[in-house]
């Protein structure tokens, strides 16, 4: 959503903070700002745009001092303006704050503060926290007391770091991530390990309801009721240390290219959890899968795979919809939550609702530790490494690989999966991207793309549409091939492009019939298949593979197509407009 970072140490804070923000920019990137403290004075600089652009224009990294805080924003309360960008000073200017999350009772708190004479410059809920801390600090002159009082007044989900005029950093975590990095003579307070991994791999993961105070070069952690807590220092997984683009132009293409390896690793570190999950599914009365966006599309495929191969009925539920139909979770069922970040608020809410119905929570997660991991009794890890590109790519195929493995366990090996072959097939698709690059040149001027798939290819058509929307800003829609004649055929004319996902399997002939119906209305057709057809204007060839495994390979050319079309349109494939990687608000 937003990224927050605090630095307290011997080095000059501003360049460290700017660098940390660049690494965490995928979390939110519409505006950026930092504040540092030097000689009992707080200085703030901020601007609209990406970290490097704002740094270029207002020279964020030149601020003096060894203590500071920084933020990249994904707007929730108030437009994208310099005034709304963080950090936000309190009225006295003696406390400054960066915040991630939502304060639900901010209107009420703001009115009370206004009655007490406080003035507000921004439209944000964050400025309310800054002024509340100031009000509470003016009564107690004690940082810890003022933060404890403040968190007792806040409702919502939040993580914040406040910097006081004397250089004390005070942070609080409540349902938004916050991690302390322990460096040599230095501390980092960060939304994400990427904020400090270049400097240290020693970390303390704060729990919900923890406060951290760094003063006089010492870190102390307290619970929201004021008790001091001792927390262990853990080593951050070494895969996080390797986050950089290497020779690739963007993270997105790097992550697409990693898939021959990442599908092999999916679930491998947590085989026991995978086996337990299969066992729970086998004995459960009702099994639900849930997720948002791409992760929901993986849940959709779970329905096809488990019913086709394991003869087990499962229900996929869009996480954000569950609060409208909590009754759909039968008591004592299983909910399998799928999430790359493990922090999507909608997914966590779905888990909460399912728990109220006494459901057992199992999850398929990439980021760990994460809130979803904490909520789950079994966790299967995707193990695909950090995914920085905002559009999910490698995490999707890792999710699918895990679902395949679960299905295989449930049907005692009836699918006969050979992931080495799948990996080679993906390698083969990646080995020649020129044709896809050529088609991307044509797509860049198109305003509507439809993606058609039948049976197991329908969830992939949905995912393909999501990727094209996010990366190219072209209207894209995934359609079950059989549904064409029930309405969407009316949209087909010579202005539209239709991608037909049509490998040579049992759905092939029926989908060719749909393609012919489309073609006769003048639309241009891109066929994704191992078998060519006259009906295709463009054919993207995929390798022949066992019929059951086509879904996991056929998304790859579409990820590439979306990526190269974004490059052609000169949009930023890593950071699509208006989006953020981990959506921690409802
Ligand atoms: C699509 C995309 C989003 C996420 C969704 C869920 O490319 O990235 O649709 O899939 O926000 O995120 P996680 O999986 O982190 O819960």
Image (cartoon, rainbow, N blue to C red):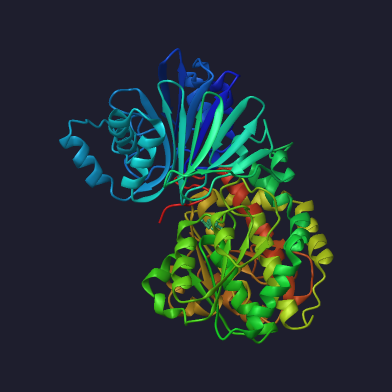
Specify whether residue 504 is in view: no
Image quadrant where residue 85 sits:
top left
Say which of 16 and 554 sits in front.
16
Total numbered circles: 0
**What residue sits 21% from the left and 31% below the top?**
118
Residue 474 % position (x, y) = 49, 53
Q: Is residue 485 above or below residue 532?
A: below
Q: Is residue 116 left or right of residue 481?
A: left
Residue 469 % position (x, y) = 50, 55
Image quadrant where residue 245 sits:
top right
Say which of 178 and 494 sits in front.
178
Q: Is residue 191 left or right of residue 323?
A: right
Say which of 143 and 178 sits in front.
143
Classify the position of the C terminus by image quarter.
bottom left
Residue 260 % position (x, y) = 77, 56
**What residue sits 61% from the left and 52% below the top?**
369
Find ligand 1 in the image and state its quadrant: bottom right
């Amino acid at each position: 959503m937003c990224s927050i970072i605090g630095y307290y140490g011997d080095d000059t804070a501003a360049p460290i903070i700017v660098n940390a923000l660049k690494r965490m920019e995928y979390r939110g990137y519409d505006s950026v700002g930092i504040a540092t403290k030097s000689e009992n004075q707080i200085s703030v600089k901020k601007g609209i745009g990406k970290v490097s652009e704002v740094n270029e224009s207002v020279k964020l990294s030149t601020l003096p001092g060894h203590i500071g805080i920084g933020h990249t924003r994904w707007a929730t309360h108030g437009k994208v303006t310099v005034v709304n960008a963080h950090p936000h000073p309190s009225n006295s200017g003696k406390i400054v704050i960066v915040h991630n999350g939502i304060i639900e009772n901010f209107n009420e708190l703001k009115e009370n503060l206004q009655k007490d004479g406080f003035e507000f410059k921004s439209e944000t809920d964050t400025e309310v926290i800054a002024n509340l801390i100031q009000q509470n600090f003016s009564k107690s002159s004690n940082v810890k007391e003022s933060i404890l009082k403040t968190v007792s007044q806040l409702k919502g989900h939040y993580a914040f770091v406040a910097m006081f005029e004397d250089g004390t950093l005070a942070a609080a975590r409540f349902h938004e991530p916050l991690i302390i990095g322990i460096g040599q003579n230095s501390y980092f307070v960060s939304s994400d390990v990427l904020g400090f991994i270049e400097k240290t791999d020693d970390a303390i993961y704060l729990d919900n309801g923890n406060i951290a105070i760094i003063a006089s070069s010492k870190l102390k952690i307290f619970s929201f009721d004021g008790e001091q807590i001792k927390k262990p220092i853990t080593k951050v997984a070494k895969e996080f240390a390797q986050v950089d683009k290497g020779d690739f132009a963007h993270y997105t293409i790097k992550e697409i290219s990693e898939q021959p390896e990442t599908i092999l690793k999916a679930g491998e570190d947590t085989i026991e959890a995978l086996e337990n999950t299969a066992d729970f599914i086998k004995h459960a009365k009702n099994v639900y899968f849930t997720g948002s966006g791409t992760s929901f599309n993986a849940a959709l495929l779970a329905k096809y795979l488990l019913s086709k191969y394991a003869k087990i009925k499962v229900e996929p539920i869009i996480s954000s919809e569950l609060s409208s139909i909590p009754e759909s979770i039968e008591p004592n069922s299983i909910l399998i939550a799928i999430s790359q970040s493990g922090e999507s608020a909608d997914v966590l809410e779905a888990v909460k609702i399912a728990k109220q119905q006494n459901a057992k929570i199992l999850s398929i997660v990439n980021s760990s530790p994460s809130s979803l991991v904490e909520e789950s009794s079994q966790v299967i890890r995707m193990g695909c490494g950090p995914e920085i590109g905002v559009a999910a790519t490698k995490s999707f195929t890792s999710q699918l690989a895990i679902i395949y493995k679960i299905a295989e366990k449930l049907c005692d090996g009836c699918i006969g999966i050979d992931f080495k072959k799948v990996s080679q097939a993906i390698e083969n698709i990646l080995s020649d991207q020129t044709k896809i690059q050529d088609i991307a040149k044509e797509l860049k001027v198109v305003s509507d793309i439809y993606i058609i798939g039948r049976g197991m290819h329908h969830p992939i058509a949905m995912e393909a549409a999501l990727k094209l929307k996010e990366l190219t800003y072209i209207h894209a829609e995934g359609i079950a091939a059989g549904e064409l004649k029930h309405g969407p055929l009316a949209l087909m004319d010579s202005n539209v492009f239709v991608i037909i996902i049509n490998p040579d399997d049992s759905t092939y002939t029926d989908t060719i019939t749909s393609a012919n119906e489309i073609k006769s209305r003048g639309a241009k057709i891109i066929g994704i298949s191992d078998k060519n057809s006259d009906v295709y204007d463009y054919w993207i060839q995929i390798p022949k593979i066992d019929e059951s495994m086509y879904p996991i390979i056929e998304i790859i050319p579409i990820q590439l197509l979306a990526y190269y079309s974004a490059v052609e349109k000169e949009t930023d494939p890593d950071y699509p407009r208006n989006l953020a990687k981990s959506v921690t608000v409802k």
